[in-house]
Image (cartoon, grey):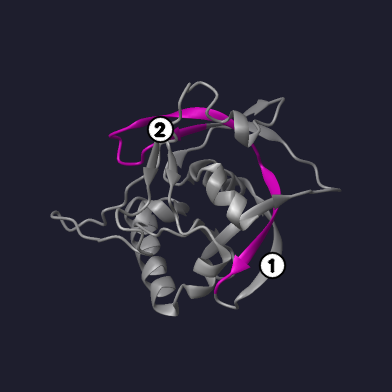
Amino acid sequence: MTVSGYSVGTIAASLLLAQKNFFSDYQVTPTVPVTPDGAFLSEWYADDGSPPCKFYNASYQYKDGLCSHFSLARMSHATQSTAMDRAMQCAVHFETDCILSPEIGLSVPAAFVYDTQNGLKMITAPKIVELTGVYVEVKNIAISDPTGTRTGKQTRLNDTIRVEYLDMAERKMKSDVMYNSSAYCLQLLRFAFDDVCWSKID
C-alpha cells in the first residue's frame, strides 16, 4: 500500500501528530514554489519517456500555490483534465494510489486518490473536520520515494478522517469519510502546503 508513492507502515501509535508539529525537527522549514511562474500547470516532459512525477518526501513545504477561492473558481475543465491525465500516468507507472498536486505540476492544493466506484478521484482544497462515532487508529507511516532515489521520514497519521472538499467535477462542496491510504494521502497534502496557503482556503 502506498501514500503518494510512499510505503505505509502499520505500527500502531498512541498520539496523532498535529500539523504544526509535522516539521518540528526542522528549525527552519525549507519552502519551494509549486510552479516557477505561478501558473496552474508547470511544464511536463521527460527525456526517457516516463512521466516526470516529482514525488514529495516531506523535507520541505510548498509555497506560492494558487490557494484562494478565486483561483479555484478560475481553474478550467481543460486544466482539470490535464491534471487527471498526469496523475493517472504517475499512479500507473509508479504503482501508487495517491498523488499530490505538486507532484504533477498542479499549483492548486489537491490530492488524487482511488475511489472504489469511480477510480482515480481529485480531492481539491480538503479541510479535515471533526469525526464522531467512528473508531480511529493512529499509525506510524513511513514516507519514501517510489523511485528509490530519496528517503523521507516517518510520522503518525489517523487511518480514518472526515474531510470537506471541493468536487471540481460538480463544482460544489462535499463531505466524505476517508480511510487508510486515502486518509494518509490527504493528511500528507495538508502538511505539504504551508500555513499561508490553507489560511486563504479554510
Task: Estimate the x, y position of residue 112 in percent, counting from the top left.
Answer: 49, 59
Does 146 lie within the magenta span? yes
Which amino acid type corresponds to the residue marked 2 in the rendered image?
A: Pro
* Quadrant of res 43: bottom left
Pointer 1: residues within 10 angstroms few (<14), some, or many (20+)? few
Indicate the secondary structure of the residue bearing disc 1.
Answer: strand
> From where the camera sits, is residue 184 visible?
yes
Q: Which sits in the foreground, 117 or 51?
A: 51
Task: Estimate the x, y position of residue 182 in percent, counting from the top left.
Answer: 58, 51
Tell me the magenta residue range: 142-168
Residue found 50% across the figure and 67% down from its top:
71
Indicate the secondary structure of the residue bearing disc 2.
Answer: loop
Residue found 58% across the figure and 58% down from its top:
125
Residue found 80% across the figure and 42% down from its top:
135
Which image quarter holds the C terminus?
bottom right
In the picture, measured across the screen, residue 79 lies left or right of residue 71, that is left
Task: Estimate the x, y position of residue 22 in percent, counting from the top left.
Answer: 56, 31
Q: Mark 2 points at which residue?
A: 30
- Nearer to us of marks 2 and 1 is 2
The answer for how far apart the CA atoms under marks 2 and 1 are is 32 Å
Q: Which sits in the foreground, 2 or 51?
A: 51
Pointer 2: residues within 10 angstroms few (<14), some, or many (20+)? few
